[in-house]
Image: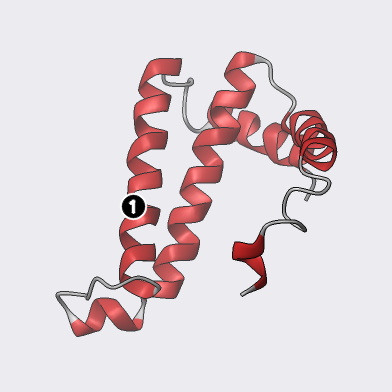
Amino acid sequence: MTLKEAQEKVDHWIQTVGIRYFNELTNTAILTEEVGEVARLMARIYGEQSFKDKKKEQSAKEDLAGEMGDVLFVLLCLANQTGVDLGEALQKGMIKRSIRDQDRHANNPKLHK
């Protein structure tokens, strides 16, 4: 699925099932909450924090995928609401990074350890 198709699919779902978009500020707060849930799982799966419950540890990677999907869903909502074409935005971001960081990472001794 392309980003454009994803934006269209989310918009269709919002219009038919979700009734309407939450306002932009509410969706920004929801996005922040969802990113926090990804961060919590990352800290436990890949970082130094431990799970309180062994059962949670067993399903953590599936949970992580779901939380990342939630982040993407809300980001797609915000893009739709604000008229941002995420495919175009990503393309421009890649061009910007390619120019700005052309030698930056290759010349960073911290990355060659």
Q: Check the image and report above or below for 53 versus 70.
A: below
In the foreground, 58 or 104: 104
> Compared with residue 92, is residue 50 higher up or lower down, i.e. above or below?
below
Q: Nearer the viewer, residue 108 or 40?
A: 108
Instruction: Indicate the colouring scheme.
Output: secondary structure
* Residue 56, percent from left and from top: 26, 76
Q: Residues within 10 Å of mark 1 (few under 14, many from 20)?
A: some
93 vs 27, left or right, is right
Q: Which one is nearer the viewer's eye here, 71 or 18?
A: 71
Which residue corresponds to the image point at 24% horizontal and 82% vertical from the top-left? 55
Q: Is residue 83 above or below residue 17?
A: above
Three-letter amino acid code of the residue under disc 1: Glu
Q: How many marks?
A: 1
Per the image, the residue denoted by label 1 is: 37
Q: Secondary structure at mark 1?
A: helix
Please report the residue visible at 58 percent of the width from the left and 17 percent of the height from the top: 81
Q: Residue at x 48, y 20 (%)?
A: 20
Q: Quadrant of residue 48?
A: bottom left
Could you say where residue 26 lies in the image, as x and y percent from the top left?
Answer: 36, 21
- The percent position of residue 79, horizontal first and vertical second, equals 62, 25
Asked which quadrant contains residue 84, the reply is top right
Depicted 82 relative to depicted 77: above or below: above
Location of residue 96 (image quadrant): top right
Residue at 46% across / 59% down in the picture?
66
Left or right of 110, for residue 32: left
Please identify the quadrant where the C terminus is shown: bottom right
Coordinates of residue 21 in the picture (x, y in percent): 48, 21
